[in-house]
Image (cartoon, rainbow, N blue to C red):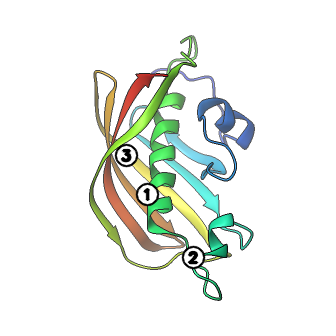
Amino acid sequence: MTATSFALPVEIGTIRKLLPHRYPFLLVDRVIGLQPNASIHAYKNISVNEPFFQGHFPGHPVMPGVLIIEALAQASGLLVGLSLPADTVRDENTLYYLVKVDRARFNRIVEPGDRLDLHVQMKRMLRGMGLFDARALVGDIEVASCEIMCAGRSA
């Protein structure tokens, strides 16, 4: 295992250095578990102030499933970025894009006040493409799961 330059928990300042996403599309608040090149545990606190709740749905706020998948994809990107050896020069022009989602399942709604725990395991990484198993939980209940493929590309 290679030493990384990050200590847990990984806070939002470091997350913002590793991911290009910004408000309102940055969907990871903190990383609390990491096994480089293997797995990550991150989370997103779901607030009633999230902009998507205005229209999804008025009077009954529900986090859109596609945003849960996006949060899992962002956690996958953090797994890749945080797994790089400490002495690696990060190419700020390379972005990781979500290119495929398979076997997506949604088991329960996510609503304001929930903490969305993001658990991602790397299945393989080959030529800048990563395949990941991803699960989102609220408490002990799995709310969504999928297999994600991300590919790196220079911007």
Disc number at residue 56? 2
Query: Amino acid under label 3?
Result: Gln
Name of the residue lying farthest toward the front? 55
Return the x and y of residue 69 as percentages of the image width and height.
43, 57
Q: Vertically, is 27 above or below 154?
A: below
Q: CA distance from mark 2 to mark 1?
A: 16 Å
Determine whether, in the image, residue 120 is placed left or right of residue 33: left
Depth check, front residue: 136 or 61? 61
On screen, residue 62 above or below 88: below
Location of mark 1 (residue):
69
Q: Amino acid at mark 2?
A: His
- The residue type indicated by label 1 comes to Ile
- Give the secondary structure at mark 2: loop
Distance in Å between CA atoms under marks 2 and 3: 30 Å
Q: Residue furthest bottom?
A: 59
- Above or below residue 127? Residue 80 is below
Q: Which mark is residue 155?
A: none
- Is 66 positioned to the left or the right of 111 in the image? left
Q: Foreground mark, 3 or 1?
A: 1
Looking at this view, is 113 or 87 the one in front?
A: 113
Q: Secondary structure at mark 1?
A: helix
N-terminal of the pair, mark 2 or mark 1, is 2
x and y percentages locating residue 112 in the rendered image: 66, 76
